[in-house]
């Protein structure tokens, strides 16, 4: 039986048990409920604890929750010795000595514990102070980092402003230098008006020969500059301002005229393209009708022929024809190819004819030459596609459908277009879309494209094709245009001397500025420079390449005189800046 002697109820039970029975009493701790044998500690409220349990009690009694004011005064420690009353005195003395030693050790341990507690409190306080200091340092570090980042952004912004200011100052210096040079060479308004009137009259005469009018205008401008240089000693600023304003207004008028001419030309080109589309639709309808007639004629012949000699052989021959063309690499079997595949004979017999590669090429070349002799637009029946290497594609005649294949668009680097007219390439929108999807295309070869007649329309188509190639093939590096007797001989006629050849190459570079190799030769800096001069002319006439070459040479021959007016023919942007 367990009795708690630390409460009134426990004391009452103890008395009752003592009076009634001889039961043994057990004292328990008010905190851990363990048996109290020795080293007992009590509080003023009367509750008993183990010494170790009492040491963990801080402010209030865990039993009755009464406050503890002074730990040293409120705690009462006592020891109970259990034993037989007849124990010898020597044994009791020895036990008391051991008890005193234990008590002394307990006091020392308690003192050490108090010392450790005080040290622990001081260390905790130091740790808290260190944490607080650490937080302050981290906040200071973040603030300094933010200030450094802000300083870096301000420094970068200041550097950017300084660079922009430097560039602005440089441009202003250049403009001032250009204006000073122009002021040094200007004369008076009368001379400028007279010379510019001559220039305008020369430009009006461009309806006769465009390049000759350009040469006359250049000659008038050259005389104007020479007169300005000799008369610039008067140094009249008001007169200079009037002259500069007049020149800029004349240039604006010329630019407006060129824009109006370009607009009219574009409208005419759109009208021509619309007529070509109508003609193509008409040809397609006629070809469809002819095909229907041939099919109807063939059906009537098949009905009159025998089953063993006509039906199966005809279908088998037609299927064999198309299969062999595909295996040989031929593209675009025409609508009227049935006349070459199937030819009826006497007795309603069917005769088939299979063409190999050489025969197809002979057919393409023969039909092309016949059309040139008759001076008409070639209409080829067959097309041939050849690939000797995976990166190379050659198309002959009606083979542009091969450009639809994805494997060609991914792998082809070099494209060769043979026996295909410029009209067909420009009118076919599908060709333009397919060519734009050839991402790796860097080289194009043109051969037999009907540039065989001195015709303004042919030249316009030629420049339009070059501009199309420059637009849809941004990586175009090499362009080869074969021109010899019977093959694009119009270009061969225009390049019959070194001067005209150089000007022709510069004209091509002006349309396709990304070219680095033309007709197997590297583009020289002089050709590229001359191309900048030609780029100011909307549609140069190849028949006057010699005049254009002389014009460019005269222009570059007087750099100290023409430095202010060369820009009118080279870059309009530089003129606007000045």
Image (cartoon, rainbow, N blue to C red):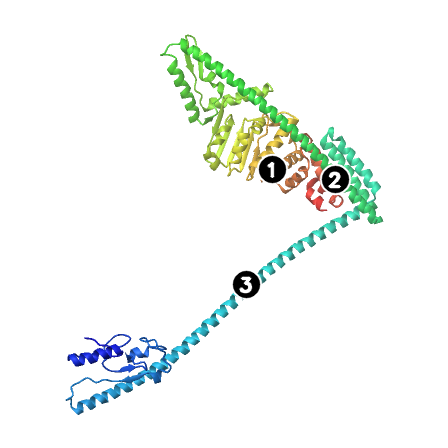
Picture coordinates of residue 175 (x, y %)?
72, 50
How many marks are shown on the rendered structure? 3
Which comes before the other along the chain, label 1 or label 3?
Answer: 3
Residue at which label 3 appears: 146
Q: Is residue 28 visible?
A: no
Q: In the figure, residue 308 lies in which quadrant?
A: top left
**52 displayed left or right of 412:** left
Q: Nearer the viewer, mark 1 or mark 3?
A: 3
Residue 108 or residue 9, whichever sits in front:
9
Residue 221 appears at what percent x and percent y? 77, 39
Residue 85 at least partly seen: yes
Q: Where is residue 67 shown, x and y percent of the image?
A: 36, 78
Instruction: Report, in whole angstroms, how far the alpha carbon at label 1 lies from the one at label 3.
Output: 52 Å
Give the distance between the C-alpha atoms of the residues marked 2 and 3, in whole angstroms: 55 Å
Label 3 secondary element = helix
> Can you identify the residue that label 2 sits on?
251
Q: CA distance from mark 2 to mark 1?
A: 27 Å
Disc 1 element: loop
Q: Nearer the viewer, mark 2 or mark 3?
A: 3
The picture quadrant where one finds residue 531 is top right
Q: Choose the circle earlier in sequence order: 2 or 1.
A: 2
Task: Check disc 1 and report the residue beneath it.
Answer: 512
């Amino acid at each position: 039986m367990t009795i708690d002697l630390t409460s009134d109820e426990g004391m009452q039970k103890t008395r009752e048990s003592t009076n009634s029975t001889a039961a043994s009493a057990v004292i328990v701790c008010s905190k851990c409920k363990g048996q109290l044998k020795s080293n007992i500690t009590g509080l003023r409220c009367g509750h008993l604890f183990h010494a170790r349990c009492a040491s963990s009690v801080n402010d209030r009694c865990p039993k009755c929750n009464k406050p503890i004011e002074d730990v040293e005064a409120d705690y009462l420690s006592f020891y109970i010795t259990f034993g037989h009353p007849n124990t010898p005195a020597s044994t009791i003395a020895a036990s008391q000595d051991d008890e005193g030693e234990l008590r002394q050790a307990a006091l020392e341990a308690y003192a050490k514990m108090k010392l450790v507690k005080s040290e622990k409190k001081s260390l905790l306080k130091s740790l808290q102070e260190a944490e607080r200091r650490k937080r302050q340092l981290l906040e200071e570090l973040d603030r300094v980092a933010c200030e450094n980042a802000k300083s870096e952004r301000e420094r970068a912004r200041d550097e950017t402003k300084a660079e922009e200011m430097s560039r602005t100052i440089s441009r202003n210096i250049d403009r001032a230098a250009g204006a000073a040079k122009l002021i040094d060479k200007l004369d008076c308004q009368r001379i400028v008006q007279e010379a510019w009137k001559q220039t305008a009259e020369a430009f009006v005469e461009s309806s006769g020969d465009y390049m000759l009018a350009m040469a006359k205008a250049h000659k008038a401008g050259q005389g104007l500059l020479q007169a300005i240089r000799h008369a610039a000693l008067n140094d009249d600023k008001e007169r200079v301002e009037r002259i500069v304003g007049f020149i800029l207004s004349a240039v604006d008028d010329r630019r407006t005229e060129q824009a109006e001419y370009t607009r009219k030309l574009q409208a005419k080109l759109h009208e021509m393209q619309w007529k070509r589309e109508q003609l193509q639709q008409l040809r397609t309808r006629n070809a469809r009708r002819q095909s229907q007639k041939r099919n109807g004629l063939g059906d009537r012949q098949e009905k009159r022929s025998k089953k063993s000699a006509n039906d199966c052989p005809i279908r088998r021959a037609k299927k064999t024809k198309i299969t062999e063309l595909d295996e040989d690499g031929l593209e675009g079997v025409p609508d009227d190819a049935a006349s070459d595949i199937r030819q009826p004979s006497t007795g309603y017999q069917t005769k088939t004819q299979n063409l190999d590669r050489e025969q197809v090429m002979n057919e393409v070349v023969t039909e092309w030459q016949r059309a040139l002799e008759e001076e008409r637009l070639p209409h080829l029946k067959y097309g041939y596609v050849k690939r000797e290497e995976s990166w190379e594609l050659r198309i002959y005649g009606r083979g542009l459908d091969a450009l639809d294949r994805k494997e060609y668009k991914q792998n082809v680097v070099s494209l060769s277009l043979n026996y295909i007219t410029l009209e067909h390439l420009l009118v076919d929108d599908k060709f333009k879309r397919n060519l734009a999807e050839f991402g790796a295309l860097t080289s194009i070869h043109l051969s037999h494209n009907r540039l065989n007649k001195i015709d303004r329309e042919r030249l316009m188509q030629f420049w339009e094709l070059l501009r199309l190639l420059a637009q849809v093939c941004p990586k175009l590096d090499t362009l080869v245009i074969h021109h010899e007797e019977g093959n694009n001989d119009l270009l061969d006629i225009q390049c019959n001397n070194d001067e005209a050849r150089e000007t022709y190459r510069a004209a091509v570079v002006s349309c396709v500025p990304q070219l680095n190799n033309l007709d197997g030769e590297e583009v020289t800096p002089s050709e590229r420079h001359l191309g900048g001069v030609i780029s100011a002319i909307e549609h140069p006439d190849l028949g006057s390449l010699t005049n254009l070459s002389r014009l460019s040479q005269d222009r570059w021959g007087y750099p100290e005189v023409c430095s202010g007016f060369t820009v009118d023919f080279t870059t309009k942007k530089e003129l606007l800046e000045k």
